[in-house]
Image: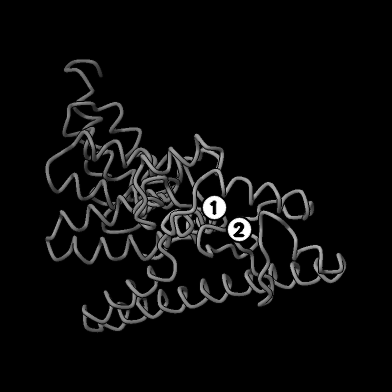
């Protein structure tokens, strides 16, 4: 069930859910030019939004935050984004910044001037490296839990332990499309289609180009009898992975069942090129022969 590693991106909806931030508040921050408007967010943007949420929860006014950010940007011109590269926090109604344990008032910059610029650059570079190391360690731990879930599945481990492993992976990396899809399949096999659909959709939010998530969601809709949605996601899987044999097989069945024989023939042929020797290929040949025979009009051979 494992696919390729998904790209690390959060949808707008997922970001709001993770941070418990309303759409109204997020739009307000964008309108006040505290953050740019985005439809997808990376780890850095998530850090910036979390910092803003903490400052606003401490009742620091947006204007105060803007002045603090402007002062830091003016003093530390090599810092691209103070919200993600510095540790900002509220002290009463003021914004302070911490660099390696040393607190400074962000807006006035008074304490910043006490630092030698070379030393300040060194401290900031150290913090950037430290943050990057923390993120790498977090993702590595998430991958370890993901692999643990796979091992348990392959050895027939208890389903409760499998679910726990994948959920721990997601706690560390909520955008792990592989873990989301595998959880969805566990619930699909348990006939909890509502829960399965939720996980498959979350996987596609994390990585819209994840062909396995499209394929599994299509299977779910096919199971429900929603052929239109099933076909939509099977075709999406084929757009991403044109050599997805199982998707060609299922699309051929759907077209054949909806009286579109020419389209069905196309996908049966594509499937047989990819899988010419399995049990399923025998079924595909049989269906393909039936379609071709039905296309021959009586007397056309004479």
| Residue 301 badge | none
Which x, y percent locates residue 87? 60, 65
| Up/down of 238 relative to 82, above or below | above
Q: Position of residue 23 (x, y in %)?
A: 36, 41
Q: Quadrant of residue 255?
A: top left
Q: Is residue 208 left or right of residue 118?
A: left
In the rendered view, tell whether residue 111 sits above or below residue 157. above
Residue at left offset 27%, top offset 37%: 231
**Observer-nearest of 130 and 174:** 130
Tag 1 and tag 2, C-beta contact below 8 Å: yes
**Residue at point 52%, 37% (across, down):** 32
Establish if 223 lies above or below 252. below
Q: Is residue 62 left or right of residue 237?
A: right
> Where's residue 137, x and y in %?
56, 76
Q: Residues within 10 Å of mark 1 (few under 14, many from 20)?
A: many
Q: CA distance from mark 1 to mark 2?
A: 7 Å
Of mark 1 and mark 2, the one earlier in the sequence is 1
Q: Is residue 112 left or right of residue 194?
A: right
Residue assigned mark 2: 84
Label 2: element kind? helix
- Give the residue pinned by disc 1: 45
The secondary element bearing badge 1 is classed as helix
């Amino acid at each position: 069930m494992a696919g390729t590693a998904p790209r690390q991106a959060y949808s707008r909806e997922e970001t709001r859910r993770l941070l418990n931030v309303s759409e109204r508040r997020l739009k307000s921050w964008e309108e006040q030019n505290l953050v740019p408007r985005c439809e997808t967010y990376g780890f850095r943007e998530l850090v910036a939004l979390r910092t803003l949420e903490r400052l606003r929860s401490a009742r620091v006014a947006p204007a105060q935050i803007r002045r603090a950010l402007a002062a830091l940007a003016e003093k530390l011109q090599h810092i691209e984004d103070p919200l993600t590269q510095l540790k900002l926090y509220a002290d009463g109604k003021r914004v302070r910044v911490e660099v390696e344990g040393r607190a400074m008032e962000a807006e006035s910059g008074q304490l910043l001037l006490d630092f030698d610029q070379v030393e300040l650059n060194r401290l900031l570079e150290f913090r950037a490296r430290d943050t990057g190391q923390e993120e790498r360690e977090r993702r590595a731990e998430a991958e370890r839990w993901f692999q643990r879930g796979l091992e348990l599945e392959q050895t027939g481990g208890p389903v409760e332990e499998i679910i726990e492993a994948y959920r721990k992976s997601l706690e560390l990396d909520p955008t792990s499309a592989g873990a989301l899809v595998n959880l969805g399949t566990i619930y699909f096999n348990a006939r909890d289609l509502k829960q399965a659909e939720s996980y498959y959709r979350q996987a596609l939010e994390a990585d819209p180009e994840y062909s396995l998530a499209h394929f599994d969601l299509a299977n779910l809709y096919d199971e429900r009898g929603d052929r239109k949605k099933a076909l939509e996601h099977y075709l999406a899987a084929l757009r991403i992975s044109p050599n997805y044999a199982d998707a060609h097989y299922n699309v051929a069945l759907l077209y054949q069942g909806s009286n579109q024989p020419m389209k069905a023939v196309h996908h049966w042929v594509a499937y047989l090129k990819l899988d010419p020797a399995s049990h399923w290929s025998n079924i595909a040949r049989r269906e393909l022969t039936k379609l071709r025979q039905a296309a021959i009009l009586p007397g056309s051979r004479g």
